[in-house]
Each structure stands twice: as C-alpha cells, then as structure tokens.
Image (cartoon, grey):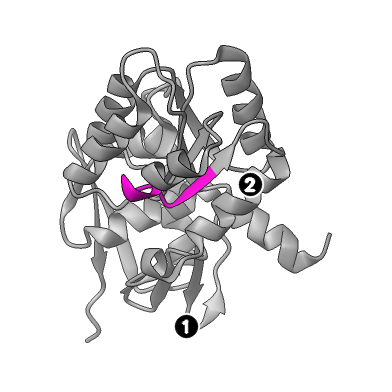
Amino acid sequence: MSGHEKNILWWFSAVRILLVEDHERLASLVSKGLKAAHFLVEAFARGDEALAALEVAHYDAMILDLGLPDQDGLEVLRRLRGKGLSLPVLILTSRVLVAQRIEGLNAGADDYLTKPFDMAELIARLHALLRRPEIALGSLLTAGNLVFDVGAREASVNAAPFPLTPREAGLLEHLLRRAGKVVPKAMLEDSLYGLQETVSPNTIEVLAHRLRKKLESVDAGVSIHTVRGVGYLLTAETKP
C-alpha cells in the first residue's frame, strides 16, 4: 500500500456512518467490514431509533435497510429529507425491481445497493458518496495560520501538513466551526464517541489537552480554552 493510500484510509477513519439494519447478523458483518475500512459505525435496528440518533449526533452518511420492523425504510428517508437533512443515504435492500430502485431514489436516496452484495463495493460506494462536490463545498475551515479541509480530513499550518489522529481532527473541526463560541463538552462526547461507546469523565479533557499541545508546537495561531463545567472554546490569536 502506498503512502497516499494509507493517508486516505487514515483520514476516512474519522467518518461516522449511521447503519440502520434489523438483521442482527448482517448488521454485525457490515459493521465489522466498515470498521476494518476505518469508518466509525453506529448501528440501529429500528427507524425511530435512527431518527432519534440524528437529532443528537452528527453522521457523515447513512446506510439504510428498507425492511425495518417499525416502519418502512422509505418512510425514514422521507422524514429525514422532510427535516431538510442532506445526509448522504445509501439504501441497502433485497428489493431488486427497477421500479423499487426508482422509488427509493425519488424518495431522496443518493445510491442503491441490493442484497446480496460485496463488502468492497459497499465501501467504494460510500467513498464515492463522500467525495461528491456538493458534500465537499465550503469544506475549508481556517483560523490563525491553520487550515482544515473537512472533506479530506487534512490540516495544515502555514501550508505545511499538520498530522492529526481521527479524533483530534474531529475535535478540531467542531471547534473551528464554532470558533469564538463555547462548544459544550456533552456535544463533543456524543459527536466524537457516539451513543454506544463508553466515555470516561476525562476523555475529552485528555483529547483537548493533546490537541492544544500539538497546535502550540507548530505555532498555529489559535488557542483552545477550557470553560470549566461547560466545554471548550477556540480563538484565533491577534497579532500585535
């Protein structure tokens, strides 16, 4: 594997996927395959659970089964689009008729893959969805000497590459998007670690401390402030 390919895998590991699949074994296999490809995965078996998760957490794409126990997956998709959410959605289903595929796409799906499927193709389709221009627009976040490319998950300081772990990149993105405002600690925990992961009381503190030290080491021109009992604040340093 080339260095460029390794870099692509490294940065895609920060991408969070919402998997909605009620077949327990298939959900487990898909989750395992996605995690092996360095995605972060949250899996739910019901449509109402998925919609509730979207209210409190950020996801980069959704894989949606249509035969859910509480409601048809197309209804989940229509409700998602009705809320104005542009989240990329890949339908994964056993419905193979052309009319059914058209119905799914017309309901707001971005792609459609029928079962049985190859895991490599599923991953390739996700990568293709996440590379689409409409998703990448407005993806450069800047502060001080720091530039963060949301689509590529790459940071640079004074045009020099600034390596970050996936979670450090996720934290930096949240802070940059709300630069000058306090980002609640609870929101960071939900977004960076998900609803199904156990997070210790000082997990975010350790992550923020590590990111702060890295930024200081390269004179990035930004500061991360701890607002005790609330969260974190990123500010750009003013030059004299």
Residue 165 in sight: no
Residue 107 rendering spot, x and y as whole percentages = 31, 44
Name the foreground residue: 125 vs 151. Answer: 125
Q: Element under label 2?
A: helix
Disc 1 residue type?
Asn
The residue wearing badge 1 is 158
Q: Please determine whether, in this image, residue 188 is positioned above or below residue 8.
A: above
Position of residue 179 in the picture relative to residue 152 (left or right)? left
Which quadrant, please, contains the C terminus?
Answer: bottom left
Q: Residue at x 55, y 79 (%)?
A: 160
Which quadrant is the N terminus positioned in?
bottom right
Q: Quadrant of residue 236?
A: bottom left
Picture quarter containing residue 4? Answer: bottom right
Residue at 40% in and 30% down: 194
Q: Is residue 132 left or right of residue 108?
A: right
| Closest to the observer, 94 or 228 | 94
Earlier in the chain: of badge 1 and badge 2, it is 2
Q: Position of residue 173 (x, y in %)?
A: 36, 57
The residue positioned 58% from the left and 47% from the top of the image is 13
Q: Residues within 10 Å of mark 2 (few under 14, many from 20)?
A: some
- Say whether residue 44 is magenta: no
Q: Which residues are magenta?
A: 105-112
The correct choice, above or below, for 87 with respect to 215 in the image is above
Could you tell me which secondary element the residue under label 1 belongs to?
A: loop
Q: Amino acid at mark 2?
A: Ile
Tag shown at residue 123? 2
Q: How many numbered dots are placed on residues in this image?
A: 2
- In the rendered image, residue 178, in percent from the top left (x then y), is placed at 21, 58
Residue 228: x and y in percent read 20, 38
